[in-house]
Image (cartoon, rainbow, N blue to C red):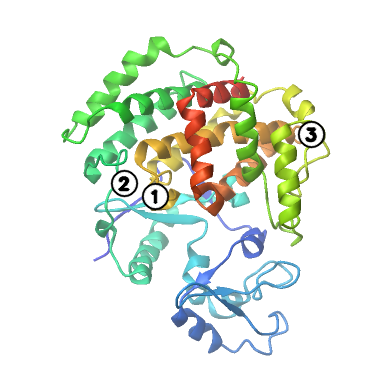
Amino acid sequence: MPHPIKILPVAQNWDCHTCGDCCRRMEAVITDEEKRRIEALDLADDPEVAPKPWFRPASGDKWSLAHRPDGGCVFLTGKNYCRIQERFGAEVKPFVCRLFPFLLIPAGNQWRVGMRFSCPSAAANRGRPVAQSEKDLIELSRLLEKHVGRSADSAPAPPLRPGQQVAWPELLRAVQVLTEIVKDRGDRVERRLRRCLAVARIGAQAKLENLSGNKISEFLKVVSAGLEPEIPGTATDVALPDRVLGRLLFRVLLAIYARKDRGVSGKPGVGGRIARVRDGWQFARGHGHVPRINESMPEITFGEVEARPGMPPELDETLERYYTVKLSSMQFCGPSNFDLPFWAGVESLVLTFPMILWLYRAFGDRPPAEALQCAIQLVDDHFGGDRMLGLPHIRHLQRTLVERGELEKLVAWYGR
């Protein structure tokens, strides 16, 4: 029997609004069985379907759905519908297409539901409450267990840190402590995330592998309460990021998070390798015009971005929802995020906050809610999915920001 579904514990909504973005951007990897099933359908003479070949070889016995020259999937119609679904029903689509933007993450005796906020409808919280999709998600969990050939309880819990392992129940209690901090509306979101970083710093140093039951959560709650007086109350009370170490490394990573290779228009967002190197160097310098490494980026200079006002308090709820989903779903560590240990995954997740807020400022010519949604979409398109972020030297840059105390400063600086 498949394991139960842990539905998102927040007011997250979603429905497909046929924007076609995922069908242009996502690499849909399918099995050989799915390929044969699609080939057996009566699609060869369909005017809405691109000419063959429809598939490209991927790793092992897997295949990827091919894309048209304009970037759209070969089965995407002119009205942004999937032709397979239109003619034969959603259950005939490849599994990866049916699942998006949801993720099902194994967590001991259950599947936890995550979500890709790179989907515009997810970022905008448009549609029905996710809880109403429980029946569909249960069916998808059955298909996933068949698809990957294992059940949820076959996945080991990510270590707290290298060499320090605890069981799933203890790990999920630690998640609950962090989730409660993120949902504490007594603080702005930026301070809630600084509190999470402080707890992660102590947790990564502690010997927790011998604690069981409620002892880990009790320990972390005591740590959180004890650290409270030491955490500056407002962003302006925090020291500025170091101009060389903090801000330069931040912009190097920002050049990855701000990129979008292909969008709804189907046009590339960046050029070839030489253009990427040039744009990366421009971000590292942080002077002059911001390279247009995605179609949404306006004509703006780095100085103008830094001078724009921060995010108003009424938008905190959007970020609270985003970080609650990422934490509660376990989407921030383990296989969902390049096999990062638990505490390193927390730090990786918090790093997205200054990325989102920098982009929010860059999109300042838009209405505030729209600017924030666009920033979240861009950042989440990379978080846990962009292979560059899993490279050792990129992970080293992230660790340097944490170890030198620059991440807290960046969170406060862009959250001010």
Q: Amino acid at mark 3?
A: Asp
Circles 2 and 1, Cβ within 8 Å, touching? The answer is yes
Residue 5: which numbered mark, if any?
none
Q: Position of residue 95 (x, y in %)?
A: 47, 69
Q: Nearer the viewer, residue 15 or 195?
A: 195
- Mark 2 or mark 1, earlier in chain: 2
Residue 365: which numbered mark, if any?
3
- Mark 3 or mark 2, earlier in chain: 2
Residue 158: which numbered mark, if any?
2
- Residue positioned 72% across, 25% down in the render: 306
Q: Amino acid at mark 2?
A: Pro
Quarter holding residue 309: top right
Left/right placement of residue 166 relative to residue 230 reads left
Q: Position of residue 51 (x, y in %)?
A: 70, 84
Instruction: Classify the position of the C terminus by image quarter.
Output: top right
**Mark 1 to mark 3 CA distance (whole Å):** 38 Å
